[in-house]
Amino acid sequence: MTIQQKIPVLLLALSLCSCAGPSQIISNWRDPGTTISRPDIHKIAVGALIQDQVVRRQIEDYMAGLYPGTAVPSYQIFGSDTLLNANEAGYNQRLKQQGFDGMVLMQQISEKTSRQYIAGTPPAYYNSWYNYWHHGRMQPVLTQAIIPGTPGHVQTDRTWNVEVSVFSIEANKLIWAANTSTTNPGGRVELFEDVCRAVRKKMNKQGFLQ
């Protein structure tokens, strides 16, 4: 028998909108014994695991700015600390003392480029035999009035894969995770916005958010 563990809202930072292209969740896991309860709102840490500290701060500020007073950028907690000194217990104690009960981490894990040929469209007179006949008979007169077709071209697409991991600070464990895929998001901010939208939709569908 599974005992549901009611914990405060850890994922308000994932409730983003105004997104670009649709992100797809290609794989997902959740702790079957954990459900996130909405009534109580506590502090959550949000982190973007990006080497470029300027980009990291931009993304974390964006995430935290959606819920001031609830979500806190990880750089404000740890600074530029890489957390490589193996003091996990100390970090956990520090987070608990500061009132944090959850952490949301996002990481771009891959980017790939692909190309596809997009077929062109023929001139308008190809849409029926009559128009084609009429064009052939009247070509000298209608040359300037023809609606031209469009040539074929090669389109380059960029696909980004982002991993989202949600941890309970109190239980010190992973409670939800997903791998996502987004094509041509338009930029880093748009990418993370759209990923968060897909994540929220998935969690609601699963009943993970209540």
Image (cartoon, rainbow, N blue to C red):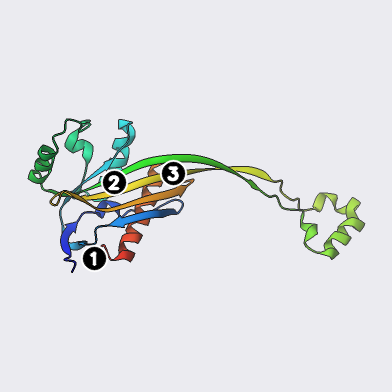
Q: Residue at x 22, y 36 (%)?
A: 75
Q: Residue at x 26, y 42 (%)?
A: 47
The label on residue 160 is: 3
Mark 1 or mark 2, which has the lower sequence index? 2
Q: Amino acid at mark 2?
A: Met
Work out how far the residue at label 1 is from the one at label 2, CA to CA, in angstroms: 21 Å
Q: Amino acid at mark 3?
A: Trp
| CA neighbours of label 1 inside 10 A, class few (<14), some (14 to 19), many (20+) | few
Q: Position of residue 35 (x, y in %)?
A: 21, 62
* Residue on which the image places disc 1: 210
Q: Nearer the viewer, mark 2 or mark 3?
A: 3
Relative placement, left or right, of 88 versus 177 is left
Quarter containing the C terminus: bottom left
Q: Residue at x 44, y 44 (%)?
A: 160
Res 17 seen here: no
| CA neighbours of label 3 inside 10 A, class few (<14), some (14 to 19), many (20+) | many
| CA neighbours of label 2 inside 10 A, class few (<14), some (14 to 19), many (20+) | many
User: Quadrant of residue 200 in the image?
Assistant: bottom left
* Residue on which the image places disc 2: 63
Does dot 1 land on a helix, a strand or a loop? loop
The label on residue 191 is: none
Q: Position of residue 93 (x, y in %)?
A: 9, 42
Quarter containing the N terminus: bottom left
Q: Nearer the viewer, mark 1 or mark 2?
A: 1
Mark 2 or mark 3, which has the lower sequence index? 2
